[in-house]
Each structure stands twice: as C-alpha cells, then as structure tokens.
Image (cartoon, coloured by chain):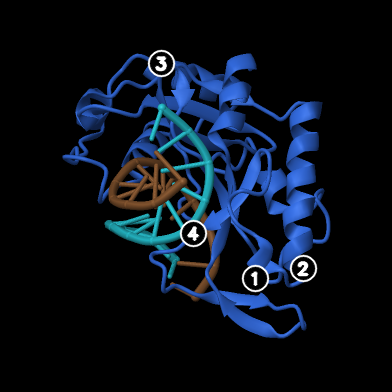
Chain colours: A blue, B brown, C cyan
Amino acid sequence: MFDSPLSEKELTWRAAALSGRTLGELARVLDVAVPEDLKRAKGWGGNLVELALGASAGNKPIPDFFALGVELKTIPCAAGRPRESTFVCGLPADGGEASWEESRVRHKLARVLWIPIDAHGPVALRRIGAPTLWSPNAEEEATLRSDWEELTGLVRLGELAGIDARRGRALQLRPKAPDRRATTWALDEQGDWMRTMPLGFYLRARFTATLLAHS
DNA sequence: CTGTGATCATGA
DNA sequence: TCATGATCACAG
C-alpha cells in the first residue's frame, strides 16, 4: 500500500501524522474493513498501522523496518497507561541463546517504535496516539538482562516447572499458543526432551508504562 | 509447527 | 482493578 520509510526521521514523521486519527479513519483510507470487536481479530490494529507505515517484514523473524533495524509495536492504552503486556518473541525450544548479547529478546528490543492506541470503545473510534522511538537506557537494559538471565537459566536447567508469569520484573514468560493443548519440545531436569506448552517473552505493562513516560 | 500481529476472560 | 493463563487469525 505504502512505501517503506527510508530513514528513522521519515518513519517518525509518518507515525506522528497518524497521531490523533481513529482506526476507522485509517481503515477507510487503506480500504480495510473494521471488525465489530477484536475478539477474533486481536492483531488487527497492529496490522493496520504496519500497513499504513509501510512495514515490510510480514511474518518473517526480522524487524518490521528491516533496513532501519526498527521494530513496530502498537500498545493498547487507557488514561495514558498500557492496559496489556507486550509480546516480544517466543522462547526457543532449547532454552535459548547462550548470552544476552546474542538473544532474540535483546535484538527485538534494541529499537522500537511504540504507537499507543485507545484500549476501549468501538474499534472504529479508537484513537491513535503520539509515537515514541525507544531504545533501552542503561537501567532498563540491566533489568531486562537480569530477567532474561534468570528465566533462560531456569529453562536451561530443565526447571520449566518452576517458571510462571510471576517471575521477572520487566520480562516475563507466559503461554503463547493457539490453545492449552499446544505443545513444543523442551529439556527436562534429566536433560531429556519432553513435551511442554510453548512460552513467549512478554514485557509487563508496568515496564512499558515507565518507558513511554520518559522517552 | 513456528513465525507474525496481539487481546480476551477469569480469579484474586 | 489487575495480572495470569488462555486464546484468536493468518502466513509460510
């Protein structure tokens, strides 16, 4: 629909131009139908904004704006604060990369364009907010790294059973699957492969709230 | 089945 | 009200 932005400056300019508009207005321009609610279209808003900004990654495991190394995340907000956690990426079956530096979490979060969208009301009337282009500051990176090391450390020890969404100050591990019957492979405490529920890394709403506030 | 995009629904 | 655990759609 639209060309990909050629620079961060162009990307932020285009994102800023969406600020204040409703999803319904944007959908009409893009000739996209608006769903009654998001129960069966949970990624609709995110996909709409991707289309408007010329994101090109599709479902490939690369940044939305590959040439710029920027990831796009829409985030549902009410009263100026995020109402939901933010999915980052799946947990690799073997527990993950050897180090934080190589991790998918760190690469995903290296540069993110956050676009707040109203969390409540009729979908077509929900307003898009002002974008913020973010990279973790030293404190945020330290928190993310510490959470990541704790969680992946447990996974590598085969202590998947000891993990739930309560662990982690900023980053948490939660189910990420079509339903509760879904399974994937993981190592148990004896080092044998076993079937478990697929998990994904998520950013807590508390964490995204602070980064949106000071960026 | 794994990746992308996320929000829903329920109990505390 | 809020976080956790569950769930939805679609591409490849």
**Residue receiving disc 2:** A156
* Letter of the chain that mark 1 sits on in the rendering: A
Q: Is residue A3 above or below residue B8?
A: above
Element class at badge 3: helix
Q: What percent of the width, then of the height, locates residue A213? A: 59, 16
Q: Same chain for the residues at labels 2 and 3, yes or no?
A: yes
CA distance separating discs 4 and 1: 13 Å
Marks 3 and 1 sit apart, C-alpha to C-alpha, by: 40 Å
- Number of marks in the image? 4
Q: Name the residue located 20 percent from the left edge and 36 percent from the top edge.
A: A31
For the residues labelled 2 and 3, the Cα–Cα distance comes to 45 Å
Q: Secondary structure at mark 1?
A: loop
For label 4, the residue is A176
Q: Is residue A92 above or below residue A78?
A: below
Q: Secondary structure at mark 2?
A: helix
Instruction: Please tell me which residue is depicted at 56% across the width and 25% down the height of the picture.
Output: A209
Question: At label 4, which amino acid type do we have?
Answer: Lys
- In the rendered image, the vertical position of residue A137 relative to residue A190, given as above or below: above
To the question of a shared chain for discs 2 and 1, the answer is yes
The residue identified by callout 3 is A17
Amino acid type shown at disc 1: Ala
Looking at the rendered structure, the kind of residue marked 3 is Ala
Residues flagged by tags 3 and 1 on a common chain: yes
Q: Earlier in the sequence, mark 3 or mark 1?
A: 3
Q: Which mark is residue A93?
A: 1
The answer to whether residue A19 is visible is yes
Residue at 45% in and 37% down: A84
Residue contact at pointers 2 and 1, CB within 8 angstroms? no
